[in-house]
Image (cartoon, rainbow, N blue to C red):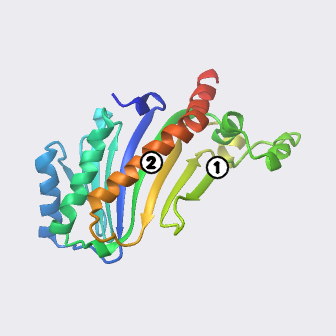
Amino acid sequence: MSHYRSLSDDFYLNMNLNTEMELPQTRETVLHYFEQMQKKYPTLCNFYCRDPGDFVLEEDKDRGDYRWMSLEPRRICSGQVNPPVLSDALQQHELALELAPYALSISRLDCESLNVTMGFDFTYRGNHNQLLVEALGVCPGLERMTEVPGATVLGSDPVLQLALDEDCRVQCRLSVEARTAAYHVRTGEYPEDQLSVYFTVRRYGSLDAGETYVSALRRLSEICIELVDGYVVDSILRPLQQTIAIK
């Protein structure tokens, strides 16, 4: 079992390929692409149109761990929630990209951006923003602000974005999304909602000569796993987990 599942209530690994040109939207093309994915993963059987031009194929969500895919006018998405083994999700994403050039006529020139995202959801009933301050703190320049008498924290969503090469073509972004609103603080009624941590590694621009979407994905995945393990688990995820546990 993936060790990431022990760090939060839900964990997911997603892949997005954003294209410069619009993807084919004909009935035959969309269904053929999804049918090719379904041959590998027969339990991908729930197909529907979410918005005009947005098509989704997914497994039964009641299982707790499930796969999903979507085709949008200029984006291919693939995801797995609570993958038992991380490599299972990566293989799904690789297949989605392996099929794309043939089934959807995507050229290596057509890449606007390709990204891999690890997401971690923590279920918590209470002020998410206050929880973030207690678990992660704030930058030293803002620390005094949290001591204002009678004040309640309404917003504290840390975001950090880094360039990982000189050309800024490969970037990573850490963000935390709290779901507590002023209404909840005012009424004191907090729903049991999810606080989310996202870590994304993204590369911009067309693929290099000799590079494939699969090889690019593998490189991004390696970077993502390395950075999450080295910089996110002990600094962000475990403090959140521990702070929630003692509440």
Q: In the depicted view, which residue is nearer to us: 202 or 143?
A: 202
Task: For mark 1, give the secondary structure.
Answer: loop
Task: Give the amino acid at mark 2.
Answer: Cys
Residue 214 showing in the rendered view: yes
Residue position for label 1: 158
Seen in the image, is 104 located left or right of residue 114?
A: left
Instruction: Name above or below for residue 155 compared with residue 137.
Output: below
Q: Residues within 10 Å of mark 1 (few under 14, many from 20)?
A: some
Mark seen at residue 224: 2
- Residue 148: x and y, percent? 87, 43
- Residue 196: x and y, percent? 52, 43
Q: Residue at x 29, y 57 (%)?
A: 215
Q: Residue at x 10, y 49 (%)?
A: 39
Give the distance between the C-alpha atoms of the residues marked 2 and 1, in whole angstroms: 19 Å
Task: For mark 2, give the secondary structure.
Answer: helix
Seen in the image, is 58 located left or right of residue 141?
A: left
**Which numbered disc, 2 or 1, marks the residue that appears first in the sequence?**
1
Q: In the depicted view, which residue is nearer to us: 198 or 51?
A: 198
Q: Split into 4 quadrants, where in the image is the N terminus?
A: top left
Instruction: Name above or below for residue 145 compared with residue 25.
Output: above
Check contact, mark 2 vs mark 1: CB within 8 A: no
Task: Give the amino acid at mark 1.
Answer: Pro
